[in-house]
Image (cartoon, grey):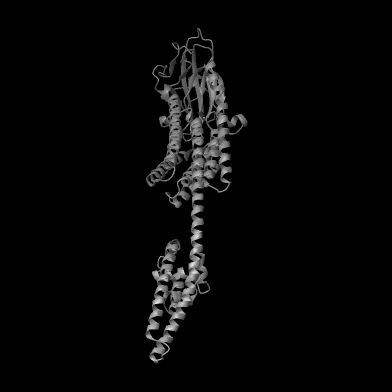
Amino acid sequence: MSSLLKRTYYKLFFKILFFIGIGFTVSCSDLDSNQQPRLEKGVIDFSQVNFEEQPTTILQGDGLFYWKQWPLDDEGKFSVEKLQKPEKIEWPPVLWTTLDYPSKGYGTYRITLKRQLTNQKNKIILNIPRILGGAEVWINGRKVASHGKISKESTSEKLDGRPLRIELPEEAVLDIMFLISNHKHRLGGGIAMLNTIEDQSYFEQQNKTKPLLEGIITFVIILFGVGQIINFYSFPRYKFYLFFGLFCLLGASRQLFIGEVLIYNFFPNIDFSIVQRMRYIGYYGGLASVFLYQVYLLPGYINSKFVISSVVIALLGIVYVLLAPVYYTTLSAPFFQVYGLLFIGVGGYQVIRALKDGRPLAKVIALGVCVAAFLLANDLLNAMLIIQSKYLINYGLLVYVFFQILVNKKIQKQREKDLIQLSGDFEELSSLMDKKQEEISELKSESYKQIKSKEKLVENLKKVIAEDESISIYNIIADVKSELVEDANLIKIKSEMEELDNEFFNRLKDLHPNLTKTDLEICSLIRVGLRRKEIASVRNTSLEAVKSSRFRLKKKLNLSINENLDRYIKKL
């Protein structure tokens, strides 16, 4: 790779890290803010907050929680006296399993919001990106929102995967209660992500374009994926195009079912169980396809059995998600989170080996692996609720896809260059083969000459013994000297044949390591088309010895009586 191209790739990579870092900083910076009001024993005081100057505040601190208690009587009427013995629970995220309660059950989360109503031009929005379970929101004894359907029984419960946005009443004190039931998620019921109190105009401004941008990004990734698959079906076929295209399509499908949940824009009444399953299918399928992509990008470092077993496990995970009830599909998440981290490790191992071996484009591929590992780790940490990043999943995925498309194109050009070089080498080798075939024909002719010469020598020796005056010992010496010169040429040709047959010998040794040097020499002579008598002449041995050698050779090659030795060797 040229130094200019290297600098271009490095600049692109550092830009990727820069924008990802900005996204990560923006996503997580509010978590450490000490200037915002906090929940204290379930109460948060906004009386000193000017929403025009500070338009968004994260709900964080100590809230109240009531396990297996709702402020509703048997007839469904609100009665705050039903809530007894609250417990403290830390926001965010707020899930009752953090208090060691079973994941299946119901309860009430409660916060009290205080504020001044003077000089407040806009209304205030309570923004809840995701609720695990069915939910109802009651403020000052009035139900203001339903999210799915709450129920003490799993059969009657209904979940909704959309964000929940509530316009808060213009009252100085707001007693806000979240009544939640959950029978369909391993993490229990509650509010799984960051929740904010926002100025209405600010909220509308921030969310006016966000779903549109997510939709555009998803559509672009789908187009990229289709383009990669089309590239695969062109000639020659590179499998890394196919697997990366599948990754793009699966990754884009996952984007439809997370974040702002774009799928509801197309199918408003879609059941949440389908949304939940598609999130897992996109993750498991994307994991398998990006793993295969990495294997074919840097072939030769991962055992094929490991590759097959890894992909089979991911496919079994998809089948499990499709067939199992939604609650049990969520139980598989920790296993595949660890599985994803394992793939990060495998990718790192491949890159380190490729860099050590000096593989072409190994450094560029390493950059892509680093970005992929960062994004996958971010996705896993979000799923485990360790961090809450808003921007990395969508925008980071787009940047990664774009970067890898450039890498794929570069790899294609490099391989095409290698093919052209290989084609030239093949033509040169083919020319050399033609030349050697001519020498082999000459070798056959020389073998016949040697036989005739030796027959003549025998006859002359007989005449000498019989004291025939027509021949003398000097004539015989002259003939032998002439044959020695011819034999030297014969040895030279045989030596060149052996050099040409190195690849053939290596392949033969790999298949049949028990062959001797004599066996290999006979195989080589059979390969160039010599018959038994010609082989005997070339090897200066008897015809019977050649027959015996061929018989032993056939046994060593595990050929049956009906199988032809010459045909088998020539196929190799």
Task: Please say if 175 is above or below 543.
Answer: above
Residue placed most toward the observer, 521 or 265: 521
Residue 232 seen in this snapshot:
yes
Query: x%, y% of residue 539?
Result: 42, 74
Quadrant into which the N terminus falls: top left
* Whether residue 384 is visible: no
Which residue shows up at 49% across the image and 58% down it?
A: 429
Measured as percent of width and height from the top left, residue 167 is found at: 55, 18
Please give the count of numbered marks on the rendered protein: 0
> Is 409 rendered above or below residue 261?
below
Q: Nearer the viewer, residue 552 or 115?
A: 552
Check the image and name the residue furthest to the top.
118
Looking at the image, residue 8 lies above or below residue 82: below
Identify which residue is drawn at 51% across, 63% down: 434
Q: Nearer the viewer, residue 6 or 292?
A: 6
Write the residue at 39% across / 86% down.
Answer: 472
Q: Residue drawn at (52%, 72%), measured in percent from left and top?
A: 564
Percent across and percent down for residue 333 are 47, 39
Q: Is residue 91 left or right of residue 280?
A: left
Residue 381 or residue 464, whichever sits in front: 464
Expressed as whole percent of the image width and height from the top left, the position of residue 128 reads 51, 24
Q: In which quarter of the view is residue 552 placed?
A: bottom left
